[in-house]
Image (cartoon, rainbow, N blue to C red):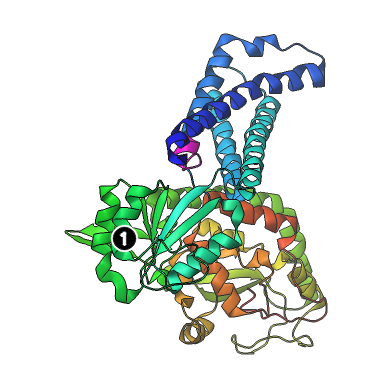
Amino acid sequence: MIRQNQRFLSLLSMLTDAFLVFIAYPAAVYVRFEVLNGLLGLDMLGAPYLTLIGLYAAVFVFALGCTGLYSTHRARSLGSGTVLILALNAVGALGMMALLYVTHLMEFPRLAVLLFWLISSALVVGKRIALFAVARYCRRRGYNQKHVILVGSGPLAQQYAKSLADDPQLGFCLDGYLGAADAAGLGPCLGGYPDLAQVLQQRELDELVVALEPAETDRMGPILAAADKEGVRISIIPFYSEYIPAHPSIDVIGQSKLINLRATPLDNLGWAAVKRGMDIVGSLLLIVLSSPLMLIAAVGVKLSSPGPILFRQERVGKDKKPFMMLKFRSMRVTATETTGWTTDTDPRKTRFGSFIRKVSIDELPQFFNVLKGDMSLVGPRPEVPYHVDHFKEEIPLYLVRQQVRPGITGWAQVHGLRGNTSIEARVKYDIWYIENWTLGLDLYILFKTALGGWMNSEQVGGSAQKEHGDG
């Protein structure tokens, strides 16, 4: 069976990755010195350097193992693992360089470290892509299948079977089902619920999936007992699964198990500190890099119309706490109510204001909001209190967005949901981001934003957006 070989394959994959990271170092030294400078660079291949790289490779692979990268999650996407590898390797390489700089143990040229990161990341990611492609190819042709029996014949069971049929590359083989009634699309009927013990004795399978309907929950005890007696792995699809987030947390109080439906990865203090640290470092760096552009924007705003350079407006932040968000002013100063929406022909807009909104230059002062802690680089876009009070009555889960700091950019924004777009769709993307947050996801969103996510549908000379709720 698959699980009998999985531990060996996982260990082999870890050792292979460690070897690839190790050989990436001499390759980086070769490129850095011989290819680029015509030197041998043999002094960089001495025992102290190779020992350090060996330790780095072991720690790096151990860190990947702690994230679950080598476990058998067939539904895990290739992209999430790739981002994780790139991010951890980057943090590790920078950390190693900083440590050596502080301790003066040995000299590492910065270009060599960059080349080491590029080559080692390319080798590990390339191996993963190759294995992923081979596994998917084999599964599509019926090999490397994970054999599953389904307990249940209602809508939950049919939904699960349809999900497997829609994605055959996952490699799940549904051998049949046991249920109270005949059902199409679930494979052969292996009997009723009382027949489970006999079926498990006669068949060898990788997993038993229990998908009982609410009226059948009294059968759960005997079903679990039969599976445990045969040592079969069990997964349960609860009848309230549509209400459970992607990564719920479970607390235990006495004999009671409590599923926290609104737990987020950022409830972990460690990950919250990592995200906040990235915000501080990133905002400082971006303030320095964008300071010439902000200076030009400030002058342009001042010359375009009388009034202050910055537009300050109250927004709702984390835990529903209000804060003053900063933007470069893009409209003429009027007494218009702050809840008013602009239009394509809004006379308050300046031409320069339309331009800086078009390319999101007006958002640059929000780096100071990030540095202060009111916002994050990545998160749901903040709204004004007026619209929060309005949307929370009409859109389910709207205030779940307030469990994290609002962001300059976000998962909804890189999917084109900016400006005058569906609030319901934005909330859907924001909730997915909150429930599935990872450091790699933040880096991916920042990367997508840098590649064009800062552009919006604003028309120079006309606006379809609002000054206060720009998405």
Number of marks: 1
257, 9: nearer the viewer: 9
- Which residue position is annotated with label 1? 195
Dividing the picture into quadrants, the one containing residue 245 is bottom left
Position in image of residue 345 (x %, y %): 79, 88
Residue 65 is one of the magenta-drawn residues:
yes
The spot of residue 212 in percent (x, y) is 36, 68
Tell me the magenta residue range: 63-71
When the figure is inspected, residue 224 is found, relative to residue 155, above or below; the finding is above
Q: Nearer the viewer, residue 289 or 78?
A: 78
Amino acid carrying label 1: it is: Asp
Q: In this rendering, would 276 be left or right of 296?
A: left
Depth order, front residue of 469/21: 21
Q: Is residue 167 left or right of residue 220?
A: right
Residue 342 visible in image: yes
Where's residue 219, x and y in %?
Answer: 27, 67
